[in-house]
Image (cartoon, grey):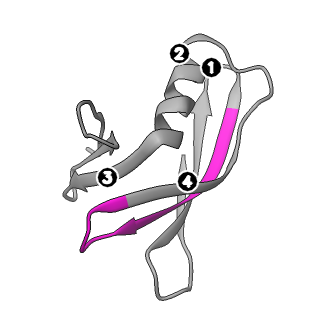
Amino acid sequence: STLDRSSAASDVYKRQGTLSNGTFTGKWKADAEGRTFSISSMKTPDNLKGKDKEFISFLNGVKYYRGDSKTLQLAPEGATTCIQFAHP
């Protein structure tokens, strides 16, 4: 996957990832003060199914984050569950 930081002053990033039947792209924004998180401009394959569909649906519902240089946890409103990404 790739990560590009925009040249704007806010923390806006472009992200690309791999699904089992293609790739997805999107822009995400993180606000460190409120720990809020949003995704916009999400582009996915038209025929999402199973775990890919579940994963993208979860990402679209994420509102909060926490983490450090090694891990990132994303959680929806209510923060009852999260998805975690680890960086080696």
Q: Is residue 55 left or right of residue 67?
A: right
Mark nearer the N terminus (1 vs 3):
1
- Numbered badge on residue 64: 3
Whether residue 54 is in magenta: the answer is: no
Q: Of helix, strand and loop, which mostly describes the magenta segment?
A: strand
> Residue tagged by mark 1?
20
Q: Earlier in the sequence, mark 4 or mark 1?
A: 4
Which residue appears farthest toward the right when viewing the image? 46
Are the two marked residues, 2 and 1, in contact with CB atoms closer than 8 angstroms?
yes
For marks 1 and 3, give the CA distance.
26 Å
Q: Residue at x 54, y 86 (%)?
A: 8
Magenta stretch?
23-36
Mark earlier in primary sequence (4, 2): 4
Whether the residues at callouts 3 and 2 have beta carbons within 8 Å, the answer is: no
Query: Residue at 23% of width from left, 32% of height from top?
Result: 80
**Image quadrant in which you'd find residue 6:** bottom right
Indicate whether 26 appears above or below 14: above
> Can you identify the residue that label 2 sits on?
51
Q: Nearer the viewer, mark 1 or mark 3?
A: 3
